Image (cartoon, rainbow, N blue to C red):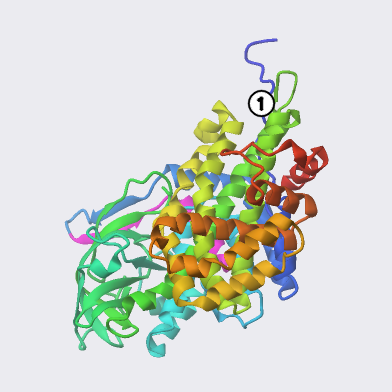
Amino acid sequence: MRTHDVTNQVPPLVGLDVLGADAALDEAVARWVRPHDADGAAALHDLGRLAGTAEVRTWADQADRVTPLLRTHTPTGERLDEVEYHPAYHRLMEVAVGEGLTAEPWTRPEGSGAHARRAAGFVLWSQVEAGHLCPVSMTYAAVPALAHADPAVADPWVAGLASRAYDGELRPRAEKPGLTLGMGMTEKQGGSDVRANTTRATAAPDGPLAGDTYRLTGHKWFCSAPMSDGFLVLAQADAGPTCFLLPRVLDDGARNAVRLQRLKDKLGNRSNASSEIELDDAWAVRVGDEGRGVRTIIDMVASTRLDCVLGSSATMRAALTRAVHHARHRSAFGARLLDQPLMRNVVTDLALESEAATVLALRLAHAVDAGESELGRLGVALGKFWVCKRTAPMVAEALECLGGNGYVEENGLARLYREAPLNSIWEGSGNVNALDVLRAVAREPGTLAALGKELALARGHDAALDAAIDACDEVGSLAVAEDAPWHARRVVERLAVTLQAALLVQHSPGPVADAFVASRVRGEHGAVFGTLDAGLGTATVAAVLDRALPA
């Protein structure tokens, strides 16, 4: 054999039908989308095939490698405050917006399955490249918050946010076929404590905007997607923290006083420009009542947290796909990796984690369609904590399945690994979400009742699962106990795993549900992936692996 001959290397993962190869997601589309919107379900399959093409994967690599460039001034010294992206970023955005992944579901009739359709599309397209989905997510999530604004202000914006036309240029809202919206909450002194923000809002009723206008002055520590057409921001008005809509370009064509100070040099999410901005007497329109800004913005946060669950489940699925593909084609010690018992244990374990995340994420999106607000309130907080928290260790394990090949950039897993921690931080880190679960249970007892109703649908399948469901009834008293914050993570983990198990019992094949219950509920599992008990049996393992990625 000549030294330059290539043997035992894995073929490129191109031409994959990302939806058709994902049984759990495909079944969720059939369950919660197709009965209401057959055309929308068909379009998702088209998107899944597009997501697996070599051309689209090239866009993703280009957008990630050639990071956004900040241009603060023109060559002659005037303020410019623009971000320049690689053309591939705009191609990715064109597809995302063109597939209705922004705010369109809020304009569709109730019961149309629009939020589940959009959620499935978000999972598919996130597996291509996650960074550009940040402005897509914020644009989707802005509509519930804008419902608090004067309709004369909100309606034109909502129409633009729901459009399937992407326009990345900075122009007045009325001149654009479609709009994107960002958010600016965090400040350097406050972090998650947005009530500590110091940005000031002063009433300015004679400004160049329609509505209750103000001038804002302050510094925002994290403002992602600064080329968005507008932002929802918090600032201190006379009555306290208040929500504002801050346009990037005013109606008369003048640039608003939004100064881009620098772009963050981030671990991952590199295609997305995250910036620090100064608001220098910038014009904004009030959204909701003065002093009620945190309550107003919570409606946006709930939707972006749902996207955190969706995006993390997508990252898990993309990592699993690469691990299975590699193990199926690579041989060591005389056998394919996927035929070796310990590797089968690892990959089966990863497949269980991925399917549980996917089914939970799509069930939460369906809850939006179904008007199940109490289940969504608690379920999204649970999913945000648990699924996002599980993503980083799962991607690390998938990367290890590839060995050294996983650690180099060209295989895609290195980018997934850098991306994996993000959603656990964004929209409140683990502690914030765990405490939010306790707050919801204590203040809104209907949320725990709604969760109990969903869990009850899985009763009778397994005695250990029944006991876990019974234990969830005790969470109400635990949430108000004096030491509740100390135990918050443990309580939330138990609730989340029980919900995932119940959903798999309802919606996934028996081998998947049984293996998940045995390992995650009965505790037949170690502290790391790949420690499934031998009692599962070879038939169950084979069924899970065959489902994970068709040969």
Q: How many marks?
A: 1
- Three-letter residue code for mark 1: Gln
Q: Nearer the viewer, residue 486 or 114?
A: 486
Residue 42 appears in view:
no
* Residue 218 x %, y %: 20, 67
Regarding mark 1 in the picture, which secondary structure is present there? Answer: loop
Q: Mark 1 highlights which residue?
A: 9
Q: Is residue 41 above or below residue 70?
A: below
Residue drawn at (58%, 53%) of the image? 314
* Quadrant in which residue 542 is drawn: top right
Instruction: Describe residue 98's horizontal placement relative to residue 52 as left or right.
Output: left
Is the N terminus in the top left, top right, bottom left or bottom right quadrant? top right
Tell me if residue 79 is in the magenta stretch.
yes
Instruction: Describe residue 312's horizontal placement relative to residue 342 as left or right.
Output: left
Specify few, some or many for label 1: CA neighbours under 10 Å numbering under 14, 14-19, or 20 or more.
Answer: few
Residue drawn at (49%, 54%) of the image? 490
Instruction: Describe residue 432's horizontal placement relative to residue 351 as left or right.
Output: left
* Quadrant in which residue 504 is drawn: bottom right
* Magenta-drawn segment: 78-102
* Residue 529 x %, y %: 60, 39
